[in-house]
Image (spheres, rainbow, N blue to C red):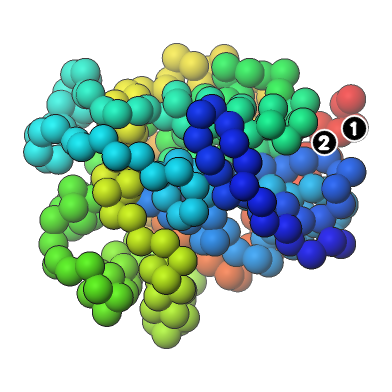
Amino acid sequence: MTAPQISTVTANGLSFCVETRGDPQGEPVIFIMGLGAQMTLWPEALLDAYAREGYRVIRFDNRDIGLSSHLQERLQGHPLTVMARHRLGLTVDGPYSLYDMAADVRGLMKAMGLESAHLVGVSMGGMIAQLVASTWPRQVRSLLLIMTSTNSPRLPMPKPQLIVRLAGMGPKGHDEASVVERGADFWRAIQSPGYPADEGRIRERIANEFRRSYHPAGILRQTRAILATGSLSTLTRRITLPTTIVHGTDDPLVRPQAARQLAYLLPHARLELIKGMGHDLPEPLLPRFAELGLEMAEAKASLI
């Protein structure tokens, strides 16, 4: 198993920080991270589980986050007003949408010479993975969708205390201590009640991410991108690829009904609801995530 390699890849007119590990000749697996999260949030143990099985493991910073390109467009409209428009099914304007972020993934694949890949998407990354799979089905081998949704305005909303945080309201401050405190408060609100994480490790991770890159405007633009995209339901139901859906029964951000809707739209998919899981990637559950994803990837390989 080769050591992780970091590179800069130009795709879709932007620059992306990309890490690869595992067998360079193995089947590629692309991990797509969620809203406001750098690629470093993917647990090493999960990535290494794929690498040990001979896969070429790829993760990257989405646009507007981490060490990938940061855009500059200013947002118009109050966040709560924009969220209300989304809930009403009205058009929301933004500097880009998830369709553009899906094109980023396809662009990365082209730039890296990948004809196809397995996709693992978490939260917003799962929405992006759905768009890639429905738009370029021949380029996707299988899907593992973790705590994600179709972005339908008909789905239950996040818990109220999370809406305030997502709107950019709450405690302010852009120094490291303030960012760590704000981040730790958010993670306490979304973490898995059945698998609570160590507070010290959470704070250490947030501090390391702050030192790597701090770009709050990008998080707001990514949030707007989700709202500007609207429902994916029509496109999602086109997906016929091998798919596994994993969701926590205690997710306060993307409620469990989102997974049930995905399973309804994708009747061929496997749905796994995990009791006690919130909106995070708890260490005790990583072996199960890897097992489910690898089973799906290997099932696809047996059909080729």
Is 286 above or below relative to 128? below
Q: Amino acid at mark 1?
A: Ser
Q: 207 or 247: nearer the eye?
A: 207
Q: 292 or 60: nearer the eye?
A: 60
Q: 158 or 17: nearer the eye?
A: 17
Is 293 situated left or right of 255 in this image? right
**Residue shown at 65%/66% (left/top)?**
44
Q: Amino acid at mark 2?
A: Ala
- Label 2 CA crowd tier, 10 Å (few <14, some 14–19, many 20+): few
- Percent across and percent down for residue 40 are 54, 61
Residue where numbered disc 1 is placed: 302
Is 7 situated left or right of 234 in this image? right
For the residue labelled by badge 1, is the local secondary structure a helix, a strand or a loop? helix
Is 93 above or below relative to 146? above
- Percent across and percent down for residue 144 are 63, 41
Asked if the residue at tag 1 contacts the one at tag 2, i.e. Cβ–Cβ closer than 8 Å, the answer is yes
- Percent across and percent down for residue 62 are 49, 44
Residue where numbered disc 2 is placed: 299
**Residue shown at 46%/66% (left/top)?**
212
**Residue shown at 43%/35% (left/top)?**
149
- How far apart marks 2 and 1 lie (CA) works out to 5 Å
